[in-house]
Amino acid sequence: MDISSCTGIAGYKTIIFKRPDITLMNKKTSNTHLIDIAVANTHNLAKTITDKQNKYQELANEIRAMWKQKAAQVIEMVISSTGVIPKSLSQSLKSITLHTNAFIQLQKSVILGTCSTVRNLYAINNTTHPNPVDYYNPG
C-alpha cells in the first residue's frame, strides 16, 4: 500500500486539480483513494462536500485509466469548524476502513484548532487595544 500526501499527480491530459491531500493506493486490490480534507463553516458543509467531490472526479477517472486501477474513488472528509459532523463523514471513514468513531478524534482536533485560532486573535487584539471595554459603547 502506498500513501502520499500533497504531491501532484502527473497525467496524460491537463487536469486543473491534481493535488489531493492524501493519495492512498492499495496495490493488491488495485484501488486508489483520493482523500481531500476540509474544515468549513457549518452553513457551507453541503457545498464544500459537493465541491470536493467534483473537484477531483476527473483526476480519479484519469488515475483509473493511467494506473490501470479497478477503482479510483474521491473521498471527502469535511467537518465544520465548530465540530458539526455531516452524515457523509461516516461513509468516508468506512470507505478507507477507519473506525466510524474516528470522527470523535476529528471533532476534538478541529475544536481545539478553532479555540487556538480564537485565542491567538484575541491575544493580537489585546496587544493593540489593551482594554476592549474602552472601545465598546453599547449606546
Image (spheres, rainbow, N blue to C red):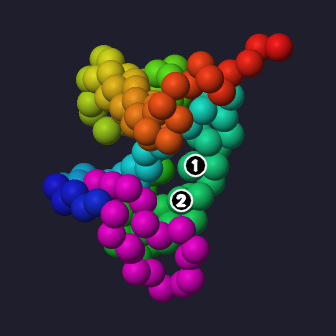
Report how far apart the C-alphas of labels 2 and 1 lie in the structure. Answer: 6 Å
Is 39 placed left or right of 27 in the picture?
A: right
> What label does residue 90 carry, if any?
none
Q: Is residue 72 magenta?
A: no
| Marks 2,1: beta carbons within 8 A | yes
Q: Quadrant of the N terminus?
A: bottom left
Depth check, front residue: 26 or 129 = 129
Specify the principal SS of the magenta part: loop
Q: Specify the segment rendered in magenta.
A: 6-24
| Residue at the disc numbered 1 | 53
- Foreground of the two, 86 or 57: 86
Which residue occupies 40% across, 49% down?
Answer: 35
Q: Which residue is mark 2?
A: 56
Say which element carries label 2.
helix
Residue 112 percent coordinates (x, y): 34, 26
Q: Judge left or right: residue 88 versus residue 135.
A: left
Report the amino acid beneath label 1. Gln
Q: Amino acid at mark 2?
A: Tyr
Q: Is residue 94 above or below residue 56?
A: above
Q: Residues within 10 Å of mark 1 (few under 14, many from 20)?
A: some
Q: Is residue 2 above or below residue 65?
A: above
Q: Give the x, y percent position of residue 120.
A: 40, 37
